[in-house]
Image (spheres, grey):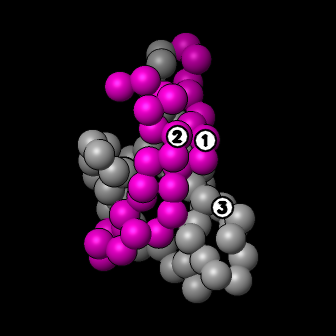
Amino acid sequence: MKISDLIGKDVVDGEGKSVGTVNDVDINTSNGHINKVDIVLEQALFPHKEEIVNFDQINDISYEVLLDKVIDVG
């Protein structure tokens, strides 16, 4: 999968709630591994609030990004 395929993917938290979309990806240039994923949270009040998620908090990446952690988009 290319990094460009990740941008805009839906993100689902550990409780199965859709919490936002992938905005950016931080790559370790020495080994090519993903360090962090920047998520724009879905909120009515502050639509551009972001959450940084470490790669080890991601359970799966397929047609959406599934997280192990719960995110409060409050």
Specify which label sits upstream in the sequence, 3 or 1.
1
Give left or right: position of 53 versus 45. left
Q: Amino acid at mark 1?
A: Asp
Q: Is residue 58 above or below residue 71?
A: above
- List x then y, in percent, for residue 74: 58, 85
Any mark on residue 50, and which?
A: 3
Q: Residues within 10 Å of mark 2 (few under 14, many from 20)?
A: some
- Residue at image point 58% right, 66% down: 41
Does the magenta-highlighted stretch encompass residue 66?
no
Q: Residues within 10 Å of mark 1 (few under 14, many from 20)?
A: some
- List x then y, in percent, for residue 38: 59, 49
Give left or right: position of 25 versus 10. right
Task: Determine the CA span between mark 2 and mark 3.
Answer: 14 Å
Task: Determine the CA span between mark 2 and mark 1.
Answer: 6 Å
Stretch of the chain drawn in magenta: 1-30
Quickly name the residue at label 1. Answer: 24
Task: Determine the CA span between mark 3 and mark 1.
Answer: 10 Å
Considering the numbered disc 1 on the image, is that residue within a helix, a strand or a loop?
Answer: strand
Specify which label sits upstream in the sequence, 2 or 3.
2
Mark 2 or mark 1: which is in front?
2
Mark 2 or mark 3: which is in front?
2
- List x then y, in percent, for residue 46: 72, 76
Give left or right: position of 10 versus 39. left
Could one spot residue 36 in this view of the protein? no
- Residue at image point 27% right, 43% down: 62
- Residue at image point 51% right, 29% down: 4
Quickly name the residue at label 2. Answer: 7
Question: Do callouts 2 and 3 mark residues in contact (Cβ within 8 Å)?
Answer: no
